[in-house]
Amino acid sequence: MRYVTNLPYETKEEEHVTIPMSDGVRLSAHIWRPTSSDQEPVPAVLEYIPYRKRDLTAVRDSIHHPYLAGHGYACVRVDLRGTGDSEGVLRDEYLEREQADAEEVLAWLAEQPWCDGGTGMMGISWGAFAALQVAARRPPSLKAIAIASFTDDRHADDMHYMGGALLSDNLAEAGTMFAYGTCPPDPSVVGERWREMWHERLENTEPWVLEWLRHQRRDDYWRHASVCEDYTSVQCPVLASSGWADGYSNAVTRLLGNLDVPRKGLIGPWSHKFPHLGEPGPAIGYLQELVRWWDHWLKGVDNGVMDGPMLLAWMQDSVPPSTSYEERPGRWVGEPHWPSPHIRPETHPLTRHTIGPAQDATAVPSEGGAAMTVRSPLSVGQFAGKWASYNAPPDLPYDQREEDGGSLVFDSEPLTEPVEILGSPSVELDLSVSEPVALVAARLSDVSPDGAATRVSYGILNLTRRDSTESPEPLEPGRRYRATIPLNGVAQAFPAGHRIRLSLSTSYWPLAWPAPKPALLSVHEHSSTLTLPVRPVEEPDEVPSSPFGEPEGTPPLAMTQVTPPEERWEVKRDLIDYRSELDIVKDRGTVRFEDIGLEAGRRARECYTAVADDFTSVGGETTWTMRFRRDDWDVRVVTHTRLTCDETDFFVDATLDAYEADRRVFSRTWNERVARDLL
């Protein structure tokens, strides 16, 4: 990244500004803005997240907010209620109170003498969720949003219930917020009230995984703040981006296809990162794109930002399987609209171990054909990687030959010419199963001539929710059903000489929680198909080879690494008691923020276990330690959550401990049972 210090506007910053809410709670904001805005008001751009502006996002914030401020904007970073230096308690994600607070923040910004009355919202992940959800509420000052790594569907396309199956990231993310939501504010900001504010958080927080498990169906809890329920609610321009290695690769094209406002889409090879910090690379000059976006929609500059393709996507070249990549080779392609007129669905029947020749997508496959069967072991999925890659530690799927031994595998013939796909593949199965609850995982892989298999995309379906996630129904063992499994969207080039592989399994642990019992899946040939969104190789890309500038930002905040970070991703199997384990460590070490004299440490460990093929032996646990220290102020929060099950119930055991120095000042334990609902 190129760090820039010579910007069009001289800037000033206010590190802690309180914004009053209507119920008396005050939120804490960090504001960067042009010095000249005291006389010449500018638009305001809000980023609204719970991840602690004072310390844990301070370095990242210092790269992009001063940059945008230096181009003529008041950039405002607000800690959500109950996080960082804001008052109150954060009880769950995306609640009505959170969105009402955001509307009040925007109204407050629009009224400031240094703001011209126009506002935008930006962010990644939670910040992008917030921006999209608030846009759907149409606050009068909000003129445009720019969002990265988000979804419009909280139930099916977040870390909770992919295809109606429970994701392990449901536990992992709950563990993250259990830790972040119970950390104290900084006494140097809030004063002597810090301890009172801290204990209010400690005493009023419970593990979020409990609430998420209480809503296993798509109900009003998930419909709230899911913009897909009413796309017409969004009436401002949207710049939407994500990455193929992220868990949120599908929402960009859904917004492009369903919104009726000015919109642009951008999908790179990235994991869960801003595009200017994108990993795997290439990262792009995203902040420059934001300046153009805000200049057009907040300042009325006619700069051509809406010219060119509606969607820019990174067409990934073939690569060997790896859990991490520094760069993904490929090229940018452009689509004028979405759905794109360039994409042609090609449907392939599944025959005995083979993906057959393409047929007309409207053709109705024959109901005949023999059945192929599989009952997958729990080991299928150990090399699946994370639902959403963070690229630290390396967390992408490894060689799929490790998984295919317990799967039904269908290969194409070696390709005689290159094939490129852009969009969401899908699998339609004519099937029967031996149990009333069962899932199917479908994986699409690029198989090189030496046999190495790189996963390209995948999808999961809880078959009890094949027709409805609102009203699931148990399966009748032996009865034939039709079920469609959508796979994650992707842009992928398959070279000549390679094969395209579809693999089907009845488990995908620990990425997804398995059914109560192992099920025998029967897939009927000829009447089951794979549909690929083929983009003909000869189609023009409609974009220059390098449509973006080099990543830029302002110099990052000074920080010293006091103790080293640690990253670990280990798969273990004991061949005596047949216990398997995936052990993940994400330890940022301890860092010192030189400007405020604060040391902060974060350590997270996730562990997922199973014994042999006992589907009720699976368990996951997440442990977080958060520590903050300055002079004689030394505080620590330790959270632990464990999720286990039997055939009828989930069991949540959790602890929350808080310390001042080495003295424990708060402790609470939870032991809860939640019934499995056809899950």
Image (cartoon, helix red, strand yellow):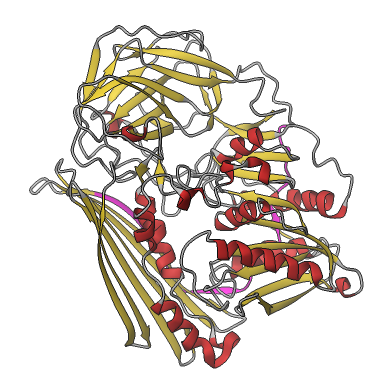
Q: Residue furthest right?
A: 39
Residue toward you, 602 or 108: 108
Q: Is residue 674 above or below residue 350?
A: below
In the displayed structure image, the side of residue 71 where residue 331 appears, left or right: left
- The x, y position of residue 405, in whole percent, is 24, 28
**Residue placed most toward the observer, 360 or 25:** 25
Total marks shown come to 0
Q: Quick check: 593 above or below 250?
A: below
Q: Residue at x 70, y 45 (%)?
A: 239
Q: Does residue 391 appear anywhere in the picture? A: no
Residue 348: within the magenta? no
Taking the magenta stretch, the answer to whether it contains residue 560 is: yes
Q: Residue at x 57, y 41 (%)?
A: 228
> Which quadrant would the C terminus be assigned to in this image?
top left
Which corner quadrant holds the N terminus? bottom right
672 horizontally vs 597: left or right = left
Q: Residue furthest left?
A: 576
Q: Where is residue 300? Give x, y as percent.
A: 88, 50
Q: Can you tell which quarter of the image residue 165 is in?
A: top left
User: Can residue 48 be seen from the camera position used here?
Assistant: yes
Q: Where does the image place residue 618, in percent across and percent down from the top left?
A: 21, 49
Residue under the image location 69 percent in, 49 percent down: 286
Magenta region, residue range: 544-571
Quick one: 97 or 452, which is closer to the camera? 97
Choose between 100 and 483: the one closer to the eye.
100
Position of residue 232 relative to residue 414, above or below, is below
Residue 307 place in picture, x, y as percent = 81, 35
